[in-house]
Structure formats: structure tokens, C-alpha cells
Amino acid sequence: MQEVIQKVIAAETNAKQRVQAARKEADELLTGARAQARQLIAAAQQEARLETEKILAAAEAEAAGEKAERLARAARDLEANIRLDQATVQQAVAAALCCVRGGISLPGQDSRATEEGKSA
């Protein structure tokens, strides 16, 4: 009878050792799987960042091209729509010079009229 009990105890001990070994192996597999998952996630995130940067760079380039095109179109529209005769151009230049020089009278104006305008 004692021999049977010892065999049962030995079998139980053996079973416990196998269970512990299986748990240890499972823990090691789980740890390895988690590490591999972290690596895959990091690689996917890096790939997503790179792809996002490419998309943003392409969008910025497209926006810059569109902006340049709009500015060029606006400049062409302005040039096509604005027609100034020579007298208007001369008057605009004289007015700009007047502003820059600080109150010098415009051609065809009396300098006293300018002075009166300042004192009024």
C-alpha cells in the first residue's frame, strides 16, 4: 500500500512539475509575443509617421503651387483690368512723391495753397 501511495505522490509531484514547466513556457511565450507586438506596433507607427509626412509634404507643395497660380492669375487680371492714362500716372507719381518728401506741392499746384491746407 505504501508503494502505491508513493507512486501517487510521485505522479502528483511529476504533474505539478509539468504544470509549472507549462506555465513557465506559457509565460515565456506570452512575454515574447508581447515584445514582438510592441515591435510591430512601433514599426507600424513609424511607417504611419513617414506616410503622414509624405502626405503633408505633398499637400504643402500642392497648396504652394495653387497659391502661386492664384497670385499669377490675380496679377494678370489686375494688369488686364487696370488701364491708366499718362496724366493719371503722372498725378499718382507726384502724389506719392509729395507724401514721401513731406508736403512738397504737386505739379500745377500753388505752394501757398499747400501751406494753407496745412495750417487749416
Image: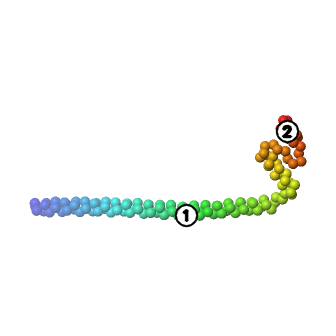
Amino acid type assigned to the residue bearing label 2 in the image: Glu
Image location of residue 30, percent across then percent down? 34, 61
* Residue drawn at 61 percent across, 63 percent down: 61
Name the residue at 84% across, 35% down: 119
**Circle 1 crowding by C-alpha within 10 Å: few under 14, some 14–19, many from 20:** few
Q: Are marks 2 and 1 in contact (CB under 8 Å)?
A: no
Looking at the picture, the colour scheme in use is: rainbow
Cα distance, mark 2 to mark 1? 63 Å
Q: Quadrant of residue 31?
A: bottom left
Image location of residue 28, percent across then percent down? 31, 61
Q: Nearer the viewer, mark 2 or mark 1?
A: 2
Q: Is residue 3 left or right of residue 95?
A: left
Mark 1: amino acid = Lys
Residue 26 or 87: which is nearer the viewer? 87
Q: Secondary structure at mark 1?
A: helix
Where is residue 105? Give x, y as percent. 84, 44
| Left or right for 54, reference 7 | right
Label placed on residue 54: 1
